[in-house]
């Protein structure tokens, strides 16, 4: 049996990201704001985004694009992917809605599933501390609705898809 080509594996990661992103949207529609239900497709989406990024790093043109400001969402994705896979925490939380005790005046915020702040996640092992990744996560993920950084990542890959010389261009 022949091993899959690097282009085939790149396609797998590209499709994996978009399929997981669609499952995340479906889960939010079906389960509303259940952080436990949303945690699985959120982690899967970030996993595939990180895998795709890692596969593209071997492309010299991609490295130079990755250093730009919008690249923080990719760095933040890699940081939370590592936290989610190595420490196995719940990385999202439900916010809003009605809570007790009720105070007057009553303000009911919409229920939203958000990414947790970095200080609410297990600490990184000392040998794997990534201060730049943690900062990028804080800037692009923390306290944001779960789909916001995912859409930023989708836009990141759409821009890469359109870049002349990109390995994604033919997909």
Image: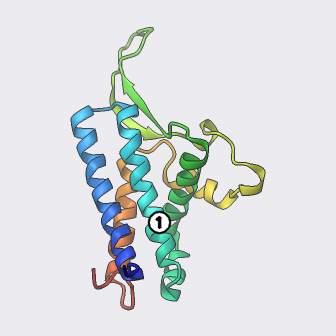
Query: Residue visible at 26% across and 53% down?
Result: 22
User: Which residue was labeled with disc 1?
Assistant: 51
Query: Residue visible at 39% across and 69% down?
Result: 156
Classify 131 as above or below 37.
Answer: below
Q: Quadrant of the N terminus?
A: bottom left
Among the 4 quarters of the image, the one containing residue 155: bottom left
Query: Residue visible at 77% across and 51% down?
Result: 126
Quick one: which residue is furthest to the right in this view? 126
Instruction: Left or right? Give the position of 89 relative to 56.
Output: right
- The image position of residue 38, as x and y in percent, is 36, 39
Classify 154 as above or below 55.
Answer: above
Instruction: Left or right? Give the position of 138 relative to 21.
Output: right
- The image position of residue 94, as x and y in percent, is 41, 31
- The image position of residue 63, as x and y in percent, is 54, 81
- The image position of residue 62, as x and y in percent, is 48, 82
Residues 141 and 16: in front is: 16
Classify 57 as above or below 165.
Answer: above
Q: Quadrant of the C terminus?
A: bottom left
Quick one: which residue is furthest to the front in this view? 1
Residues 90 and 5: in front is: 5
Residues 128 and 102: in front is: 128
Quick one: which residue is furthest to the bottom in this view? 165
Among the 4 quarters of the image, the one containing residue 112: top left
- The crowd level at tag 1 (other Cα within 10 Å; few <14, some 14-19, many 20+) is many
Q: How many marks?
A: 1
Classify 55 as above or below 142.
Answer: below
Instruction: Left or right? Give the position of 110 relative to 71.
Output: left
Query: Residue visible at 58% across and 53% down?
Result: 82
Name the secondary structure under disc 1: helix
């Amino acid at each position: 049996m022949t091993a899959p080509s690097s282009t085939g594996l790149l396609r797998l990661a590209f499709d994996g990201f978009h399929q997981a992103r669609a499952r995340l949207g479906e889960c939010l529609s079906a389960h509303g704001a259940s952080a436990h239900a949303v945690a699985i497709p959120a982690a899967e989406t970030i996993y595939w985004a990180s895998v795709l990024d890692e596969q593209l790093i071997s492309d010299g043109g991609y490295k130079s694009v990755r250093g730009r400001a919008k690249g923080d969402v990719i760095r933040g994705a890699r940081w939370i992917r590592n936290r989610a896979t190595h420490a196995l925490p719940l990385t999202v939380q439900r916010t809003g809605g009605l809570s007790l005790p009720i105070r007057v005046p009553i303000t009911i915020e919409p229920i939203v599933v958000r990414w947790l702040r970095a200080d609410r996640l297990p600490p990184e092992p000392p040998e794997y501390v990534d201060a730049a990744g943690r900062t990028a996560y804080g800037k692009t993920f923390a306290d944001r609705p779960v789909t916001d950084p995912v859409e930023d990542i989708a836009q990141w890959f759409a821009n890469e898809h359109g870049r002349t010389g990109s390995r994604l261009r033919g997909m």
